[in-house]
Amino acid sequence: MRTKLRKWRTTFWLLSCMVLTMGFTSAYAGTPVRGGDLITGYGQFPSHFNHAIQSGAATAVPGCNIFASLVETNTKFEPVPYLAKSWEVSSDGLTYTFHLVENATFHDGKPITSEDVAFSFEIVKANHSFGPSMLGPVDRVETPDKYTAVFKLNNPHPALFMVLSPALLPILPKHVYGDGQPIRKHPANTNPVGSGPFKLAEFKPGDYFILERNPNFFRPGQPYLDRIIGRRIKDPNANFIAMKKGDFHLAMFNGGLRLKQIESLKKEKHIVVTSKGYEAIAPVYFLEFNLRKEMFKDVRVRQAIAYAIDRKFITEKLHSGFSKAATGPLHSSFPWYTDQVNTYALNLEKANQLLDEAGYPKKADGYRFSATIAWYPGEPDSMDTLAAYMKPQLKKVGIDVQLKPPADFVSWYKHVAGWQHDMTMSNIYSWGDPMIGVHRLYLCDNQKHVVWTNTSGYCNKELDAIMAKASVETDFAERKALYAQFQQILTEDLPLIWTHEAPYQTIYHKNLNNVITSVWGAASPADKMYWTDGKMP
Amino acid sequence: MADDVKMNEIAAPSRRFLEAWYMFASNKAALLGLGLGILIAGVTIFGPMIYPTDPFEMVGAPMSPPGEELLLGTDFLGRDILAGIVYGARTTVLVGFAATFFTLVIGILIGVLAGFYGGWVENLLMRVTEFFQVLPALLLAMVLVALFSPSLYTIIFAIGVVSWTPVARLTRAEFLKIKEREFVMAERAIGATNWSIMWKVMLPNAAPPLIVAATLGVGVAILFEAALSFLGLGDPNAFSWGYMIGASRDFIWDTWWAVTFPGLAIFVTVLSISLIGDGLNDALNPKLRLVK
């Protein structure tokens, strides 16, 4: 009944609009208009909406619409005002003063104050899995008045603005989350009182959630969409058909679709496919060696494998051009990236020669040694497919690859976190800055029994020193020079072979506007997104 | 009538074999099955020598249709479908026979003991059998394979564990039938041990239905292997038909050939085995022989 009414209302509204704007349509399409729902499918469905305590895109994507943050990040890695209307940074880089907008309220009507900022900072620092690396340098947040928050740092923090973005530091209401209940089990995680452009209207765990426009959002006129509906996708084929028919309007992080399916969707007239919006998350895929295993202790063996893998074949043939070859530990969208590093173009002769030199001659059966490859489950195009490629490819240089597909995430986790692997394929999200998302793979003292830490067992004191310096260097050029060294050393030592950058695409209906407004892509508020003519198709 | 049956039962093995063959050969469907079986055996043994392309290697453009670059086309990675079918035959046939052998070993052992001894032994063994019968076979196989990480051995083991129960019941039934027969009595009278009566006298006489069951079991085992591989629980280092279908199922709209040909291969193999099994059933069943 309600939807019917809504439909009539929309139709009426639309008709009047058509009458009013007849003749001006082209000019009109460029102005954001209110109206319409956005339906989007989630392969990994969130179990709650509090991304202050939970890393990962599944929670962060809806979370960024529910919670606002101090700053947003534009498409050039620059901070833009959000809850903070302005800020000052002291000349020593140790004091950041933020002035909050004064008309911002939480979804329950209470004003957003500096107390809430200080509270959210404490929560994220103590509970988010990147808490220590993101906010370690920040000593405390002072609150001289209701609308001023001062971040006091122990040492300079070049990535602070990235940390303050919606994806990483959501502003939670202290009066709700600070009531003494343990934050991990807080009932407001699934029934949040937020600060962002949308508020949660309905949530059926494991099935769907509905976000509704927050009418009191502090940015006037925004958001434009009436509702955002997130549906869990159990089968990628269902998402494929729904996108093709136009029933679903947006798929982020490939929406569980296979690349060949995206290639086929790309041919549809109503669909736009873009690879933009993953610059900050910056996922890099790699083949990791376990340096504790005898054969991989020799750098020549690792180099030989690097020479045997044809990255061009991976990106062009296996990924139909949707991915980009990686040259080193940093994603090429990062401002600190350099391509002035050791590169390993396909060269089977050299690979064979290096393996001979390393003392692994071919035996009677044509093989030098045997090694297993495991991989992270859940991304068939980047993992299973690459494994299927590695096996015959490394056979050409005499390495007998035994595939060890994970039965599930837990068994892969135990295998790699237990340091039992020979090789594993995996990926990391770089989360906006090398010191947040990248260092963890290479730091000597980060060899933990946890995946996505330094499970390869690599240790280079010189590199450790460079990472330590880069973590406090605030001068961009100096920092870039340090990271150039970082990339050069790693591409010589090769504890991992970086194969490609994420083949992630955002697939959306052509009438949807302002889909990507930040380097954070989908992990940013959708308050600027709107339907052409305010009408969903 | 009773005398005739007895005559057949104690007939010399060679005559018995010839008669069975005669019966088998007069069944056209069975002969077709045998012909297909020989073809598949040929592919399994000689295929990789005649067509030595590595099924794992990406030899062509991805998703090229049959006849364009390669006879049966390539899958979404550019792997040769024909090479996959040729090499997959080995995995499939190996798993089919090895799992059936395993099934027979467990099933016959339990069936023989239960049928021969009766009493509490039978009760216990049959309750165990029933316990396994009520478990959903494919689910149990999946759990076993996932538990011990997928490899050819675990798959053979898992298929064996879930499919021995009919063999056990069949063996027991046959044993119950012939336990009181004169020739068994005669063996007892001359002082043969239980062991020798069980294995040397009774089992060969209970064999015909078991041979039929075993043949059909190979077909079932092949289907099981295909199902497990399709679900991603196959041995990742052995190319199999089920794996090919499972890997390409997301692309069925674009590459029908990548799922159809391995599917046909499974179909033909299982059909051939079923036809052979039916033929054997007719040929080895003495009652049918008398009717004719």
Image (cartoon, helix red, strand yellow):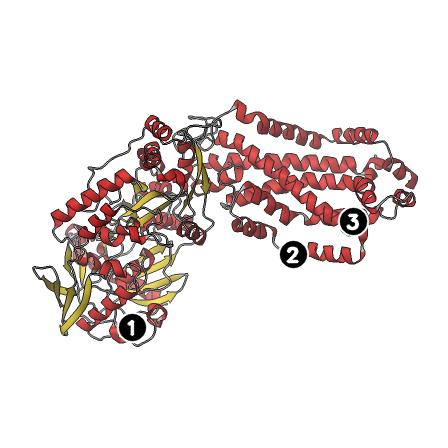
Q: Quadrant of residue A63?
A: bottom left
Image side of residue A510 versus residue A93, left or right: right
Residue where numbered disc 2 is placed:
B134
Dot 1: element: helix
Amino acid tagged 2:
Val
Taking the image as shown, residue B144 lies to the left or right of residue A481, namely right
Q: Tell me the SS state at disc 3.
A: helix
Could you tell me which secondary element the residue under label 2 belongs to?
helix
Q: Residues within 10 Å of mark 1 (few under 14, many from 20)?
A: many
Q: Chain of mark 1?
A: A
Q: Nearer the viewer, residue A421 or A6?
A: A421
Q: CA distance from mark 2 to mark 3?
A: 19 Å
Q: Nearer the viewer, residue A343 or B253?
A: A343
Give the residue at x 31% y 53%: A446
Task: Note whether residue A226 is visible.
Answer: no
Q: Amino acid at mark 1?
A: Tyr
> Which residue is the site of mark 1?
A177
Instruction: Specify the amino acid type for callout 3.
Output: Ala
Compared with A356, A485 (above or below) is below
- The residue tagged 3 is B173
